[in-house]
Amino acid sequence: MLQRLRNAWVQMILSLVVVTAFLVLSGPYRGYFELLTRLEYMAYDARLNLYMPGGVDDRIVIIDIDEKSLAAEGRWPWGRDKTARLIDVLFEDYGVGLLGFDMVFPEPDNSSGILVLEELAREELKNLTGFSEQLERLRPRLDRDAIFARSLAKYPVVLGFYFSTIPNLAVGKLPPPAFVKAQFEGRDIPFMSGPGFGANLAQLQDAASGAGHITPAVDADGVIRRIPLLHEYDGKYYEALALTIARLALNAKSLMLGFPEQAKPGSNYQGMEWIDVGNRRVSVDQEVRALVPYRGKQGSFPYVSATDVLNAKVSRSRLEGRIALVGTSAPGLQDIRSTPVQEKYPGVEVHANLIAGILDGTIMHDPMYTLGADFLIVALFGVILAIALPLLRPIVTTIASAGAMVVFLVANLWAWNDNLLLSVVPGTLMIASLYLLNMSYGFFIESRGRRQLAELFGYYIPPQLVDEMSLDPAHYSMDARSREMTVLFTDVRGFTTISEGLEPAELSALMNEFLTPITAVIHRHRGTIDKYMGDAVMCFWGAPVPDPDHARRCVECAMEIVAAVAALGPRFIERGWPAISIGVGINTGDMNVGDMGSEFRRAYTVLGDAVNLGSRLEGLTKNYGVHIIVSESTRAVVPGIRFRELDKIRVKGKHEPVTIFEPLGRKEALGDEVRTELRLYAQALSLYRSQSWDSAEIQFVNLKNTYPYRAVLFELFIERIAQFRRNSPPPDWDGTFTFETK
């Protein structure tokens, strides 16, 4: 009984440590932990998709510059006279109530040729009688910006503009700000801000009823969940497009900032929690951003093709009295966004969702005080479970933990239904961690005696070296040390597919048939097998028995392994098994070798960057269509073998590039055909690195046609050339290709 109480106290102390850790993570520091942030994004998206109202909200209609409109009316941007006609038609023929543009008009429209005519009037045709007078009479019809401005001035139209991260970018004219810095004196509010902007021509901005920014808040995963309702630039604060449109729709002349009574200037809590728009209260987070209340996937608001509007093919009842938003769903116009409800989603519909949310009062509450609520919830559940679970039997612990998880999630969903956003991840992870901690306590602590017995069998030396080392044991040590060695990784390609097609007994037999000859080859070349990893083998040369010829032995071993696996093919097919193909990665360099591990299990193994590179090279073999890839450090110390230079690469996580090669065999054994291919390939590679794309492409295409068995390698460079034509590398590019994945 005394031992049980002692163990319970130990578990309670460990549990309280876990609770304390999650209390910290649920507080102000949660944003600094990328994994928790990404998990919280996923939890938010799941709740949003679960509770989306769905249906179509026809109060807001999207006038779509779609592919149909571009085909019928010409490529974008259209002439401002056509855009002006679109405005006139929408208000006069269809009776829309309010119009917003999810686009910017920063540059003058000179497509009418007015500048050319003015130049002619000043120079070549200045003496032509009546030309200047006729030009002045035509000017009102040729000045398309003026035509557009006149249409803007006649109706309630809101233009868009954007803020940029480019310093000193200042294009067009900003609208009057909603607020100035003095109105936030004494308050430290972290508004979103940017050092530059792109706005509309002054002539257009002055004519419009208003303007709002269209700059979203893009989360770390590239998804748009929030829009900053106020964005700061140069000490001034500007409304979002959706906020401006909603304000005009509600006939609100201005906005009212919402601070709770305790949020006084200079106090510990200074946060703004809402913005009043007429009789609507819009909740904001600590950065004055609003969560977009998505109704559903694309099409939650009616779409009307702009060309159908211009050509009177739309029923008046679809548009009359509505809020109209001019935007685009055409991919080529680059306003497709990633959202929680759909990966490819028109940006204009993001604004439509936010406008509808403001009008309906359905914006989620996410003020700064929710951090305190998260903290208290984690503390409540954590302390109760930390005290209770160590005293319960395993089955009761499972039931209690599951019950606590259900209660926590139900409470969170209840808050969501009340438009209050609370965190999910810290609480659920804390409950799960406490459960796992208490359930595993017996394994890690109470079964210590059994584990100590297992440890006696966990320390080992690779058996193939025992006999040689036993002849002079004084010269060998299991202690960790650093030395130059060569490591080899091999892996079966498509093993998952192979394993899914075989019964367990057949798969076991196949692996035995595969690993046995490979192991024999490694032993024959004096390699040390570090470990088997399912279908993969890791081995090294140069320890524990020093071997100055370790790189050559390793490369020759790799070529013999490939040949041995190829020889297995007919035998496997006779037995109804699939033939196996492998990839091999080899690297030479300084590595740490010795007896390493934990108190539970140890092994004689190698560690270091050079080891990691060898593993990465094995993973690249399928990219190049080869069986073996060796690094430049290995190739440099194996003079008797001919290598093909494959590429100069930078693997993920490494800054320095490395040149990689494929071993082809001993130099004297290569035939003339292989030598010719290598010469032509070297020429193509040189053209590629000098950015002579056309010549290099021709050379690689010819190589592909002449040597089809190397098609994967040549096709790789053909595809890269196509990419570099679209996105050219810098002039000082040295031919290095960077892999973004492992």
Image (cartoon, helix red, strand yellow):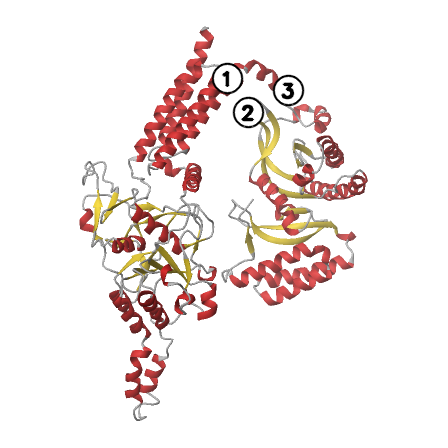
Q: Which residue is mark 2?
A: 598
620 and 30: which is toward the camera: 30
Q: Which residue is mark 3?
A: 457
Check contact, mark 3 vs mark 1: CB within 8 A. Answer: no
Marks 2/3: CA–CA distance: 13 Å
Label 3 packing within 10 angstroms: few (<14), some (14-19), many (20+): few
Q: Give the percent coordinates (x, y) of residue 115.
A: 34, 79
Q: Which circle's residue, 2 or 1, is located before the other in the chain?
A: 1
| Residue 654 visible here | yes
Is residue 337 depicted above or below 524 in this figure? below
Give the residue type that dot 1 points to. Ile
Is 490 displayed left or right of 197 in the figure?
Answer: right
685 and 360: which is toward the camera: 360
Marks 3/1: CA–CA distance: 33 Å
331 and 349: which is toward the camera: 349
Give the residue type that dot 2 points to. Ser
Label 1 packing within 10 angstroms: few (<14), some (14-19), many (20+): few
Give the residue type that dot 3 points to. Phe
Q: Which circle's residue, 3 or 1, is located before the other in the chain?
A: 1
Q: Which residue is mark 1?
A: 395
Q: Which circle's residue, 2 or 3, is located before the other in the chain?
A: 3
Helix, strand or loop under label 3: loop
